[in-house]
Image (cartoon, rainbow, N blue to C red):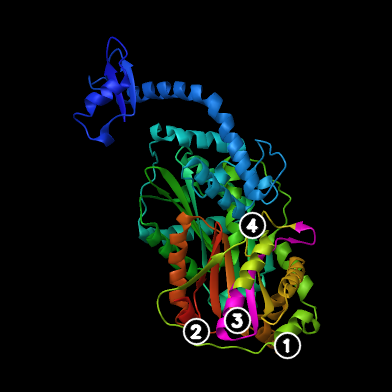
Amino acid sequence: MICFYISNKEIESTKIKNLLKKYLNEYMIPEFYIKLDQIPLNNNNKTDIKSLKDIFEKYYMQILEIKNNISDNIIKQKIKSIIKTTLSYESDIPEDLSFFMLPGGDSLSSIRLITNLEKEFGINLSDDFIYLYPTINSMGKYIEKAINKSNHYNNYLISTTKENISEESIEEKYKILSQKILSGNFIKKYETHYLQKVYFFDNFNSFIHINIDIPLTYNLSKITKALNELIRKHELLRSKIIQEDTLYFVEHNKNFDISEDILIFKNINEEKINEKIEDILKRYRLNNLLYRFYINYTETHMRLNMIFSHHIMDQKSVHILKQSFFDILNDKIENKNRPHFSDFVKIIKEKNNNYNFLLDEYTKELFEVEKHSFVPYTDDEILIDSFKIINNLKNNERIIFIVKMILSKISKIMGIDDIIASTIMNYRNFNNKDFSKNIGDYHTSVVFKYSNNWTENVFEQKFLKLLKRYENGYQPQQYIFKDYPEMNELQKKMEVAYDLNVLVSINYLGEIRQIEKKEIINKLKKTRNTLKAFPAKKIYITAFTEEENCFVYYLTAPEKLKEVLL
């Protein structure tokens, strides 16, 4: 609240406050008091609100200028200290260096950094804060404004010629967009990775959602240009899947303009639109785009919603796509000499197609473990467990710690000494080719044996050694499912060890923030309801960490486990 008053002399704000308190409730008492010679009027002889806002902004900027010299350096030093603590990094950090260029500066640590910044400065930051403001300088400027609430006094009006688009037209516009992007000249055709074959022929429809909150300071044409460039940059956004003797990706050229094809809404129910788009992507999974996006305007920001088929996106790609989008939006120059998803598919095939997996020590271990079955619990509620996580663990160490804690509990409760389990990893460096800037489904399901009879640290040593092999392109599943759904006798035998006999499947999402928790749990409930319809084959677990706590959600589990956890 701002009070403008006319007087021949300055009046102490406390005197005006005390007077107003006799007539107004506390929440209506202004924070700022500005003396004017006269109240500005517009052409209609009414109070000119815009002029008053301009007067206030000048007044407020004068206050900030006095504070800035003191607060700017203090804030930046605090940010630098928080980054060092978050990354366990001791060297000095240049104030114009991107957080993502620092060792360990990735999507996982960016969430921890946001959480630490919020605690230190007592403000709320969006999930995309580090993408928008990746340097200490840019973080400092934003946080200083947030602390002083100067953003409260900036009113950006939504201005667009687009009208809200009805749900019925979404499908037609999706077809038009597919035709526009995929009708250009053919670039290349290559066989898909084995994962796309399994997803397609098992009718597994899973989607990755990416939500990007963009300040209204960016205009629509800027967003449109960035989306155009994003699609040109990533070949899977210009590709479709076709079915012939097997499944193939077909990539098309880069000459298109989607400016007139962006879906734009205002204050709509996003969940309803998302369901509609997911349904479209299920029905048109061949010969069409494998994603769709739209913009939803609110009073405070515009949200770019992107829905991707799992065929072309994994969870790691969310961070990559966001960073790519913001780099383009902020006119950062990219390295164009990147390898392609087709290069990754070729490398994995070459490394695994002629490998004798039956002689491999890890495969032999898997064949030693007998298959375990269980009677699942049938309640609607998800079983939840939690435990403390050791601080400052590196990524592989953290995953090993979490996996061991979970399997140790399951082993004891079910009375099973030996378990075959799997967990999802994401490797993007093979044969000196760096895929860390590429979107796509690069995830690897690491299958391993766990034994409660192993002595101290044996599991850790074995698991680390196995991860090193996967890091170098070892993927038995590529051999097993390379001709899927066709399988020879050897492939079927391998499938038993690497899939059918797996008792526990663990998906670690990484570090999350408190505000994300509700959305994640809602998604897990939907997954739980889907899994209830299937016979119990595996214990499906999703885990994530929130500061020093690890939360474990059992989407399927034995009755025995339910009795202990509840």
Task: Report the residue marked by disc 2.
Answer: 560
**Is residue 482 visible in this depiction of the protein?**
no
Q: CA distance from mark 2 to mark 4?
A: 48 Å
- Residue 301, x across and y down, in percent: 42, 44
Mark 3 residue type: Ser
- Secondary-structure class at tag 1: helix
Mark 2 residue type: Lys
- Residue 345, x across and y down, in percent: 71, 67
The image shows a total of numbered marks equal to 4
- The residue segment tinted magenta is 406-433
> For residue 395, what is the image quadrant?
bottom right
Q: CA distance from mark 4 to mark 1?
A: 35 Å
Q: In this rendering, would 18 be left or right of 414? A: left
Task: Report the residue marked by disc 1.
Answer: 490
- Secondary-structure class at tag 3: helix
Q: Earlier in the sequence, mark 1 or mark 3?
A: 3
Q: Is residue 419 magenta?
A: yes
Mark 2 vs mark 4: give the one in front: 2
- Residue 37, x across and y down, in percent: 30, 12
Mark 4 vs mark 3: give the one in front: 3
Residue 328 vs 542, above or below: the answer is above
Q: CA distance from mark 4 to mark 3?
A: 44 Å
Q: Residue at x 63, y 69 (%)?
A: 424
State the quadrant of the C terminus.
Answer: bottom left
Q: CA distance from mark 3 to mark 2?
A: 11 Å
Structural crowding at the residue carrying mark 2, measured as other residues with C-alpha within 10 Å and reported as few (<14), some (14–19) or many (≥20): some
Task: Report the residue marked by disc 3.
Answer: 411
Q: CA distance from mark 1 to mark 2?
A: 35 Å
Task: Report the residue marked by disc 4.
Answer: 235
